[in-house]
Amino acid sequence: MGCGKQGEMMVLSPKYVRDKVYAENRYGRRDKTVVHEWGHLRWGVFDEYPTPFNPKFFVSSRDLIEATRCSEAINGKYVENGAPCQADPKTGIYRRSCDFTDESIRQTSQTSLMYKQFLDSVNFFCSSNAADESKRHYEEAPNNQNKHCSRQGTWDVILNTDDFKDGNNPPIVGDVNTNPTFQIVQYSSTRRIVLILDTSGSMAGDPIAKLRQGMDQYISSIVPTGSYVGIVTFSNTAVRKANLALLDDQSSREDLILKLPSRTGGSTSIGSGVLEGIQVLSFDQDPAGGFLLVVSDGNNNFNPDIDDVVDEVVNAGVIVDTIAFTDNADTSLRILSDVSGGNTYFYRADTDSITVLNEVLIATITDRSDLENQDPPISLFSEALSASSSANTTGEVTIDKSVGVDTIFSFTWLDFPIEVTLNGPNGITFDQSSEEYDLNNNDNIITIRLTTTAVSGNWKFFITLLSSSSQFQSQIVSVNVQSKQVSEDDPPVTINSFVSDPFIDYQQDPYIVVFAFATKGNDPVANADVIAILEKSDGSDDVIELYDSGTSADITKDDGVYSGYFFNFTGDGRYNVEVKVRGNQNTAAISNGGNSRSYPIQGLEEEAVMIPVDMFERSASGGAIQVTNHVDSDIDFFGPSQIIDLAVIGVSYERQSATLQWTAVGDDFDKGKVFEYDIRFAETFQGISRNFSDADRVTFDDVTNGDLSVIGKPGDIEEITVRLPSRGDEVSYFFGIQAIDDANNTGGLSNIVAANLQYIPPLNPDETDTAIVLYVVVGVVGAMGVVMMLIIIMYLKRRRRNANNPNAMDI
């Protein structure tokens, strides 16, 4: 999520948990590895070892080429194919094929657990102010911790989290039993859900019709077979409409659908509905692990209140998901979700579309897809289309090879009847004459449920508005397509979307980050096209692009997590988030990627394998955002994002220059173009990190290649070559950059990089040159070759020695 921010999840593979020998041979002691991962999850600290996107080596303030590590006291050897490492004159540092091998036996450094947790001597997080060098943070190392946390030590960040700041959780004094205790918490082995549905007077008309449409599809198509579902309605009081019923076939689903409410009236007592739902879950069993899905459009205005039932929810151990059916829904709904570990959603019910409602209902299942290996539906397509009496409305859905089982096309509307024709890529057609075609006139739903595995490819549908009137008519038709995976050997791409904070106090943090996590099995999916649609309570939408670029809002490149900022809030209220993902010709699953795991003992240099992914499309709910204390302002107080991938990609001793590269950010975070870049250099690391404004600024005259006046859009690669004041032994320059917008807001100081301007002789790929010369000499001069050989050897040795000094003269 960001430095010092709590993460979303920590994943330990089944093999890691079950196979101690495998786990410890690969990552070291499991207690230290879990603490390393907990540091990411709980306290928002980052790895301090090199990654595929961070350099293994750098030039330090001591004008030495050093390994990326923490602490500086970590000692080891620099080895390349069994020989000492050679510096590359093109980069000024050791080549990537060089390895830094930590001393394991004689290692004395005690930090850092975010570096290589398997080292025996390492037992602490690093601190910037530690008196002991072996515990002190190394701020110069180009690792993720320094990039994302402004060069703070991991312990400094941890101490500033809610767990420890203001004197929380002080050190334990004296002998204390530190053996951990574990409480295993899991969902009920069988999914049990009670629908808690608002039937108060404000739900009359279209709201109750749309609620029925959504719940009809939820029961008939979304809830996995083998689940138990009950129904409770509430207005002044709660009414039990259906006890828990096993959904084991289509007939049992249809029986439960008949019990959905259609009448409305009375006040709103959400609390009574919750209490009755707990009673339904408690029938003949412990309610713990069961789910309540609470849907309401208004304020709790009849006892008991929501606050009055919180203790009962906690004591029962149930999980409560809530759907605010309008922006007028009680803001305390979030409390039910917060205290129970449930999720909060928003559906703006004054729209004619129920696509968002369907996405929300699917999310309540797919976010918890591990119950009894139940196979949850995957949302492929979700759109609200305008159908008119003047022409057919058409649409197209891509079904990839990994899905196709239990594929369902659903079409819902409110007013005028419609007909649908569906054409598959193999030429087969489904229409009202097909047995797969079902028309529900009561709730205005057409469902086409494919009885065989859907053929992969593009499916086209045609919507015809039936009207007896000669006047032009139109209406919104909600189209949702879902399917399930075909084979366990070919897992489908799945999407999990969420936001950095669903509850925004605009006066404190006037923006959020939207995340979409795309995976295929356990592998992250890279290079997909991802957008987030934020639906506001006034009916308008904002579309933002999400990126997996490792810049701006995104933390790590190619880890399958796509991110983007949103700050265009227009007022207090709720905002719905929906994410859409499409594959393209460059989309691939990354196997063996080392971007998001602890450092294994044998190193991170496994080759990442890019596995092409079929063209696909997915949609998912990202939940809801609730904004308070919004104020309108014409002042531009959003600055550019911080640049975190500044790099020296080349140096030239001959030209006395360094080539810099970075990814462009936006005028407001990652939106729009920045006004200018402020690039500065100094002869010391501290000259940039502590005195950036006093360092020498790169001017237009200093740039020998590239153009500082030509600024790219966010995500573009920027590159310039800078001529520097001097070169020679122990000459290095440190660089930093700030992006500045037209209101003079800055994006903060970037990561700091160094360029080594000492003379480095050309690389010697092998030592065969001497042998070749000797062979030729001996063949030509015969016996005299011995003398010539000695002369040539002396000459070659002198040239190689002089190569280290460019000013030396050959004799």
Image (tube, rainbow, N blue to C red):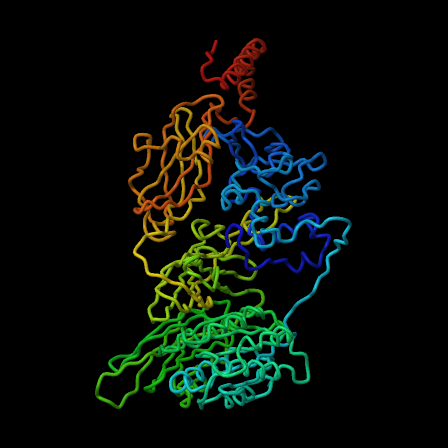
Above or below — where is 811 with respect to 31? above
Q: Is residue 12 left or right of residue 453?
A: right
Above or below — where is 441 with respect to 165? below
Camera-nearest residue between 800 and 86? 86
Q: Is residue 453 left or right of residue 176?
A: left
- The spot of residue 288 in percent (x, y) is 65, 75
Camera-nearest residue between 3 and 527? 3
- The spot of residue 636 in percent (x, y) is 32, 52
- The spot of residue 282 in percent (x, y) is 65, 82
Count of labels shown? Answer: 0
Q: Decide if residue 618 is in sight here.
A: no
- The spot of residue 348 in percent (x, y) is 39, 74
Residue 227: image quadrant is: bottom right
Q: Decide if residue 576 is in sight here.
A: yes
Above or below — where is 468 with respect to 574? below
Camera-nearest residue between 765 and 649? 649
Above or below — where is 437 with respect to 365? below
Which residue does the image show at 47% across and 55% down from the upper left?
Answer: 526
Which residue does the image show at 46% across and 49% down from the upper left?
Answer: 550
